[in-house]
Amino acid sequence: MATTLEGRDSSGRFMKGHAHSHGNPFARQLFAMRQKLYAAVTDDDFTAIVTKMVELAKDGNVPATKLLVEHLCGRPHQSIHLTGADATSTDKMNVADVQLAVIEALADEPSAKLKVSRALKRLYEQAKTGGEE
């Protein structure tokens, strides 16, 4: 694979030998904790917990309602309304122009430039499909 950025392969992943190529050092610990959690909670326990959460939501408990809705429907998409330097709306601004301006601003930061490019591409793809993932 060809190297495109310092220490990364052509797909943007850290290459072997790079300080960050080993991934999350706490992944094994987190996996072990999750195993213990799954082992400690039986199907009946989980059913009782969910039933209680539904009861609390029905009784008007806002945090329980929020948690229940987020898990059933997913979190709502957050949006940002852009305004220009003079606080005028940028609704008519071309997304490609915004992308180009951000990429140019990050010219001296290749890894940030790559991350922003990928994030903007994901946003563009989501917008094309109507926000479905």
Image: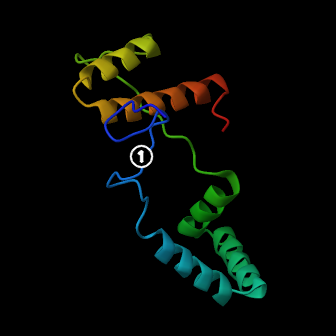
Q: Examine the rendering and report whether any part of residue 86 can be seen.
A: yes
**Quadrant in the rendering for residue 40:** bottom right
User: What is the x, y in percent for residue 131?
Assistant: 63, 33
User: What is the x, y in percent for residue 126?
Assistant: 60, 30
Asked if residue 10 is positioned above or below residue 87 in the image, the reply reads below
User: What is the x, y in percent for residue 60?
Assistant: 61, 68
Q: Residue at x 44, y 31 (%)?
A: 2
Q: Residue at x 44, y 10 (%)?
A: 92
Asked if residue 22 is positioned above or below residue 76 in the image, the reply reads below
Q: Where does label 1 land, which residue?
A: 15
User: What is the x, y in percent for residue 37?
Assistant: 60, 83
Q: Examine the rendering and report whether any part of residue 89 can be seen.
A: no
Q: Residue at x 31, y 16 (%)?
A: 101
Taking depth in this image into account, of 109 and 81 the one nearest to the observer is: 109
Taking depth in this image into account, of 72 and 126 the one nearest to the observer is: 126
User: Looking at the rendering, in which quadrant would you find the C terminus?
Assistant: top right
Asked if residue 116 is positioned above or below residue 52 in the image, the reply reads above
Asked if residue 98 is positioned above or below residue 54 in the image, the reply reads above
The amino acid sitting under disc 1 is: Met
